[in-house]
Amino acid sequence: MTAAGPDVDAALVERVKQGDVRAFEMLVIKYQRRIERLIGRMVRDTDLVPDIAQETFIRAYRALPQFRGDSAFYTWLYRIAVNTAKKALVDLKRDPLVTEAAMASSDDDDETSRRGLEPSDMATPDALLASKEIAATVNSAIEALSEDLRQAITLREIEGLSYEEIADVMNCPIGTVRSRIFRAREAIAQRLRPLLDTRNGERW
């Protein structure tokens, strides 16, 4: 089933090139949430995410005639999203870490516990507190990474891209991608170790 994904995308791209706007709308529907999630990890300002996502798809639509299919469509789209988000941050002179710090200081700081670590009804208060603390620690550890490391670990662990796809998106060798992901995992594990009390050398 997964193998059909790129084939479907390629067929839709060809239809867009022939002037079928509905085909592009289908691509937007398919990837909008993933693109918004990726941008949200880079920008961390929820007010900006929809605008940057919209700009991403507008740029993709305009550039589609030049898309030759050398990479998968969504890899190409992710690269546009990353560049659009970076440009938005430069234009707004906003540091994503500063934005995140401002968000963390608000009362709505349970966002991290709702995203990805949904507790079960059987969870004890201690377990709930621990899972919330772990989620917050992972998120703050990711935010503390350099932009290159944060982008690499987000594409790998959250978006599930392969090393080859990440190398394509980040426009760097696979060896560099592996190094960045390794360093990111080590940094996150270091922050988690005191919480999890893991044995030396155990991976998270």
Image: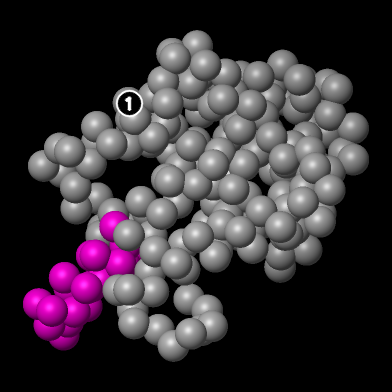
Q: Residue at x 55, y 51 (%)?
A: 154
Residue 128 magenta-highlighted: yes
Q: Which residues are magenta?
A: 116-136
**Foreground of the two, 12 or 103:** 103
Q: Tally the marks.
A: 1
Residue 55 magenta-highlighted: no
Residue 192, placed above or below residue 29: below
Give the left or right position of residue 103, taking residue 97 as reference.
Answer: left
Residue 126, placed above or below residue 171: below
Q: Which residue is mark 1?
A: 47
Label 1: how many residues lie within 10 Å, few (<14), some (14-19) or many (20+)?
A: few
Name, please, the residue furthest toward the top.
91
The picture places residue 16, in percent across and down from the top left corner, at 76, 27
Of the residues shown, which amino acid type is indicated by label 1? Answer: Asp
Examine the rendering and report whether any part of residue 36 can be seen. Answer: no
Q: Residue at x 69, y 22 (%)?
A: 61
Which colour style is shown?
one colour
Q: Residue at x 43, y 13 (%)?
A: 92
Quadrant of res 35: top right
Name, please, the residue furthest toward the front.
200
Quadrant of res 60: top right
Give the left or right position of residue 71, taking residue 193 as reference.
Answer: right
Residue 130, placed above or below residue 3: below
